[in-house]
Image (spheres, helix red, strand yellow):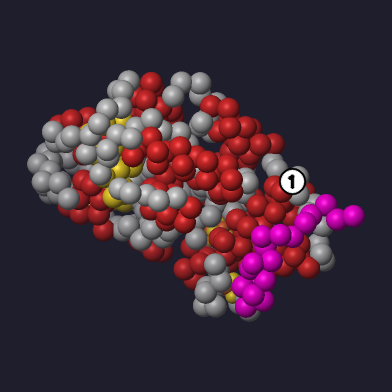
Amino acid sequence: MSDFEADKIKKVNEALNTCTMCGFCKSVCPSFKSVGWDAGSSRGRIILTYGLLTGGLDADDSVIENIYTCTTCADCVRRCPSTVDIVEVIELCRSDLVKSGHILPKHKAVADSVDKYGNPYGEKETVVKTLGTAPHKAKIGYFAGCTAAYREKKIAAASLSILKKLGADFTTVDEVCCGSVLQRIGIDEEKSIALMKKNVEAIKALGVETLVLSCSGCYRMFKIEYPKFVDVPFTVLHMSEFLAKQDLKLKPLGEVNVTYHDPCHLGRHCKVYEPPREVLKKVPGIAFKEMKFNKSASHCCGGGGGVRSAYPEEAMDIAGTRLEEAGAANVIVTACPFCVANLTAAAGDRKVKIVDLTELVDANL
Ligand code: SF4
Ligand code: SF4
């Protein structure tokens, strides 16, 4: 008896057969550049999924590893002339792998932690307790996300500080994990839908009209994934979009060269490219230079898709490449706590600072 049951991947049978094996996707795949095997490339994952679907392949350790070394950056989707949604293929394949009992130990720990504590980091305190500000009725809700709340606390602190400085009518929200990590690693959909309902109910109860989020992954969830399953009766803005609409009076930065790293989930997945750049333009005399690979062609930080937890060496390798691409910049600004965490971990003793847009704004507002 097979150790894999094809279920959700039946939906992408046509996409799998549409692939012409041209390899355009492979030319940009960061995991391929790190792993070095065709099986660890976007095209390779199409072949593996087809093999699992038709029963030609068993779900052995090597197949599982190659399906899980994808960061879900979606650069392959941009490049595919046949418009194959490779990320959808991979995520559905992961879903079937998990359902068939093939879950990576690191990902099981993450999923168990979300079940038990409402966050992937095994933190026992709630987000609002960590932030130190109790929720109350207000027009603007601030959703920190687990990474800004528990691992990159300076980003949540900067966001709250900016909202205070701007005199906004805002509140924290009684949030739990947005469900992104569960979706990315293939955990049963019912679990992420339960989190969606919990978050939306908590936000609605506060009379929030606009939700502002620090994390690109959480933002993608509220903007694109939540509406597929639950009613989202408020406006959803990434912090960069919120800041771009404000009349910010910022101080100059001094003698630093600045560049911007587009987070995959904010950029390619949600097409938010200009707002962070508009905010940076508000800094008087800023010495800003785009990276060679920017906006829709931006390269991944290496941390997404469950790669940072399960394959940290690959995550560091991809982040190292991205840091090299920053060239002469002393400051890399990004707009996602997860990118900040992964790029900073890989920076070592390089003379470059990685900051979230909110940190830069708060320090100069
Ligand atoms: S989403 Fe990114 S890492 Fe995954 S297969 Fe596509 S290009 Fe490679
Ligand atoms: S770019 Fe598209 S058609 Fe070409 S190999 Fe990749 S998935 Fe297949």
Residue assigned mark 1 = 102
Q: Residue at x 39, y 63 (%)?
A: 296
**Left-right relation of 52 to 36:** right
Q: Main secondary structure of the magenta part?
A: helix
- Residue 204, percent from left and from top: 33, 39
Q: Position of residue 332 (x, y in %)?
A: 33, 45
Q: Residue 310: x, y in percent?
A: 63, 40
Front residue of 331/113: it is 113
Q: Residues within 10 Å of mark 1 (few under 14, many from 20)?
A: some
Q: In the image, is residue 329 above or below residue 25?
A: above
**Which of these two is toward me, 210 or 325?**
210
Ligand 1, image quadrant it occupies: bottom right
Secondary structure category for the residue under label 1? loop
- Residue under the point 21% across and 46% down: 243
Identified at 57% across, 61% down, the residue is 88
Q: Is residue 13 magenta?
A: yes
Q: Which residues are magenta?
A: 1-18
In the picture, the quarter occupied by the C terminus is: top left
